[in-house]
Image (cartoon, rainbow, N blue to C red):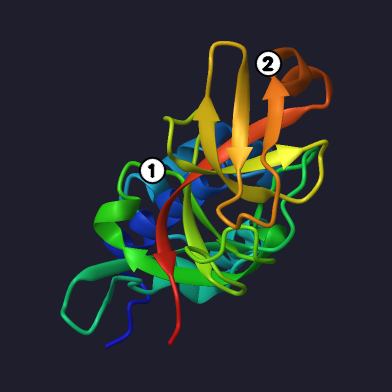
């Protein structure tokens, strides 16, 4: 049975993509020249938009129409609910790395892990975190700008591609420790973190590896 015309599914998907793209009702009405009262009725599930309006919204979010009108509930083989999060390409400073144009795919994770967290996935390159992380591993990262000692963190150094290291904080500096003893640790004072800059963008929460 088609989901076309199901207001509840449309509203759920619409709100998901609005939150994902950090857009509110005023943003969308201004950008797409929708009457606010009409959009509010769509948003609140009172009326279902015409297919041409759905297409405008899909183009706006850079998604397919089916992403707005079909039930996207997914489950793993054990029946546990799962969701997709973005698998990113190169993460650099100076732009919104979570924007959809920077996705190279998606990764399925347990919905419980995703609830209330802003998550993204990165593919591991290199062997500085061997043997815990190896080339082509995928790590699930919670977006945040701080960490606890011992966390595996994702950092941007001088605006370059994200690096993954074990983090440790002291009173005056942070240490980014490779697990592979062939590599030297990186140590930055808090002043250097501002001047270089060095920015923490997330903490690794899960490892996904294909065998």
Give the x, y percent position of residue 51. Answer: 53, 70
Give the residue pinned by disc 1: 117
Assess disc 2: are there few (<14), some (14-19) or many (≥20) residues with their C-alpha within 10 Å of its C-alpha. some
Which residue is rendered at x = 25% and y = 79% of the image? 76
Of callouts 2 and 1, the N-terminal one: 1
Q: Can you say whether 93 is above or below 140 in the image?
A: above
Q: Secondary structure at mark 1?
A: loop
Query: Dot 1 surroundings within 10 Å: few (below 14), some, or many (20 or more)?
Result: few
Name the residue carrying label 2.
190
Residue at 55% in and 53% down: 179
Q: Is residue 93 visible?
A: yes
Q: Is residue 181 above or below residue 118?
A: below
The residue lying toward the viewer, choosing from 159 and 100, is: 159
Q: Quadrant of the C terminus?
A: bottom left
**Rendered-image quadrant of the N terminus:** bottom left
Q: Is residue 170 left or right of residue 195?
A: left
Relative image position of residue 65 (x, y in whole percent): 54, 72
Label 2 and label 1: CA atoms lie apart by 27 Å
For image coordinates 53% across by 36% down, the residue present is 167
- Which image quadrant is residue 34 in? top right
Q: Nearer the viewer, residue 84 or 61?
A: 84
Q: Nearer the viewer, residue 174 or 107?
A: 174
**Which residue of the protein is positioned furthest toward the front in this rendering?**
181
Task: State how many labels appear.
Answer: 2
The quarter of the picture where residue 181 lies is: bottom right
List x then y, in percent, for residue 62. Answer: 65, 63
Q: Nearer the viewer, mark 2 or mark 1?
A: 2
Instruction: Work out whether residue 100 or residue 107 is closer to the camera in this orientation and state it.
Output: 107
Q: Is residue 197 left or right of residue 203?
A: right
Secondary-structure class at tag 2: helix
């Amino acid at each position: 049975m088609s989901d076309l015309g199901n207001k509840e599914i449309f509203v759920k998907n619409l709100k998901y993509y609005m939150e994902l793209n950090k857009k509110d009702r005023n943003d969308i009405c201004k950008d797409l020249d929708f009457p606010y009262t009409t959009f509010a009725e769509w948003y609140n599930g009172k009326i279902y938009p015409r297919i041409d309006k759905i297409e405008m919204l899909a183009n706006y979010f850079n998604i397919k129409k089916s992403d707005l009108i079909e039930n996207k509930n997914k489950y793993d083989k054990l029946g546990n609910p799962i969701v997709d999060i973005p698998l990113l390409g190169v993460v650099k400073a100076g732009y919104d790395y979570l924007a959809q144009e920077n996705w190279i795919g998606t990764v399925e994770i347990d919905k419980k892990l995703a609830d209330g967290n802003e998550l993204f996935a990165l593919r591991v390159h290199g062997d500085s975190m061997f043997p815990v992380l190896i080339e082509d591993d995928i790590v699930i990262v919670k977006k945040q700008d701080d960490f606890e000692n011992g966390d595996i963190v994702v950092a941007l150094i001088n605006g370059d591609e994200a690096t993954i290291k074990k983090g440790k904080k002291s009173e005056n500096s942070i240490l980014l420790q490779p697990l592979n003893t062939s590599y030297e640790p990186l140590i930055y004072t808090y002043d250097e973190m501002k001047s270089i800059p060095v920015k923490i963008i997330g903490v690794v929460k899960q490892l996904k590896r294909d065998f």
